[in-house]
Image (cartoon, helix red, strand yellow):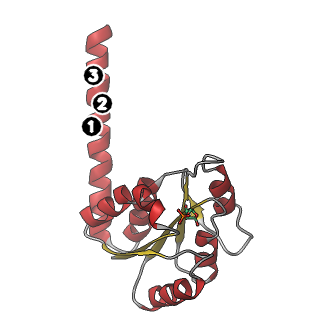
Amino acid sequence: MKVAVIMGSASDKGQLTGCIDILKEYGVDVAVRALSAHRAHGALAEFVEECNNDGTDVIITAAGMAAALPGVVASMTILPVIGVPVKGSTLDGMDALFSIVQMPPGIPVATVAINGGKNAAWLALEIMAIKYPELKAKLLAYRKEMEASCLKVNDDIKAEFN
Ligand code: RP5
């Protein structure tokens, strides 16, 4: 299981640490890069070409402002590309959200919430679970754990107010 995580700038790093932690917790081999689509497009193209040939399963991308990175990466691969809009200081991430989600037909980017790095990891795991049965079993077990902890909270609330 192999995932590439590309951020547009080191300033996006904070939005990806949770994502990278989740992937590693599930035993995924993670290759992390900071390669701007605007400032380093040559190196970005070389890295995506590596991903196309080295068994990478999914590419996670994160960028803010005029966030071209996810769409540009998607244009260079048929691997599933997940986009994380990063909240900048001026337009609160709406700029990045619209840049990432509004892709033309044929070049999709699976866009998660603004600053939704953790869901990018969960979505990548679910995509890979189609191919890796042991990962599928782990994700199903995790859903059961989440349900159990949610029901425990419900029991506590019932006991407190009823
Ligand atoms: C985007 O511009 C990056 O993804 C980052 O979110 C934003 C600002 O980049 P820096 O000026 O902090 O490098 O391309």
Name the residue rendered at 26%, 20% in the picture.
156
**Nearest the camera: 38 or 134?**
38
Specify the label residue 151 is tagged with.
2
Which corner quadrant holds the C terminus?
Answer: top left
Q: Is residue 111 left or right of residue 18?
A: right
The residue singled out by tag 1 in the image is 148
Which quarter of the picture shows residue 73? bottom right
Q: Is residue 9 left or right of residue 147?
A: right
Q: What SS does tag 2 mark?
A: helix
The residue singled out by tag 3 in the image is 155
Q: Where does the image place residue 60, in percent across and percent down from the top left? A: 47, 68
Instruction: Name the residue furthest right.
Output: 104
Give how far apart the Cα atoms at labels 1 and 2 are.
5 Å
Name the residue rendered at 60%, 50% in the picture.
93
Q: Relative to 92, does residue 38 appear above or below in the rendering?
A: below
**Nearest the camera: 49 or 122?**
49
Q: What SS does tag 1 mark?
A: helix
Q: Where does the image place residue 74, in percent across and percent down from the top left? A: 60, 76
Q: Is residue 126 left or right of residue 114?
A: left
Q: Earlier in the sequence, mark 3 or mark 1?
A: 1
Say what amino acid the circle numbered 1 marks: Ala
Do the numbered discs 3 and 2 sit on residues whose CB atoms are within 8 Å? yes
